[in-house]
Amino acid sequence: MSLLTTFNEAFQSGDRDGMEALLHDDYRFIPHVGGVTMFKADMLSFAGSDAVRQVNHRILFENDEVAVEHAIVHFANGSTSEAVLSFHRLKDGQILSTETGATPLSDDYQLIDPTA
């Protein structure tokens, strides 16, 4: 199973121990909004919460050094859903950093089946 698949399963299920094992101690998360950098402890605090829900998630590329994924993300605070592209740097079998870019989606967007 891929590192990102394992991480996403741990994140969605609230498996903090699983996430902690997969995030490097020097982990940095640079989100597309807010102008702040978050750290490992910040990511662990989101584990299993309903703050972020992903649908139509897919891993676009992954090797031992980098990984790229895309998902439609819904936020519990009611803000607009977004199409989010995430770029991860990997080191020693862990996620070292994550940067995201996003496109806000209108309320009437339709999911497109990428396999169709």
Image (spheres, helix red, strand yellow):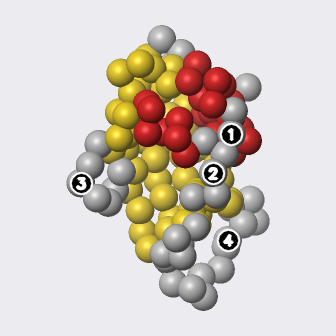
Query: Mark 4 = which residue?
Result: 112
> In this rendering, is residue 99 above or below 89?
below
Within-10-Å neighbours for mark 4: few <14, some 14–19, many 20+: few
- The amino acid marked with disc number 2 is Ser
- Distance in Å between CA atoms under marks 1 and 4: 28 Å
Q: Which residue is mark 2?
A: 49
Q: Are marks 1 and 2 in contact (CB under 8 Å)?
A: yes
- Viewer-closest of 59 and 51: 51
Query: Can residue 2 be seen in the rendering of this structure?
Result: no
The residue at 51%/84% (across/down) is 106
Which sits earlier in the primary sequence, circle 2 or circle 3?
3
Q: Which residue is under mark 3?
A: 35
The residue that label 1 is drawn on is 14
Q: Are marks 3 and 1 in contact (CB under 8 Å)?
A: no
State the separation of the CA atoms marked 1 and 2: 7 Å
- The answer to which of marks 1 and 2 sits earlier in the sequence is 1
Image quadrant containing the C terminus: bottom right
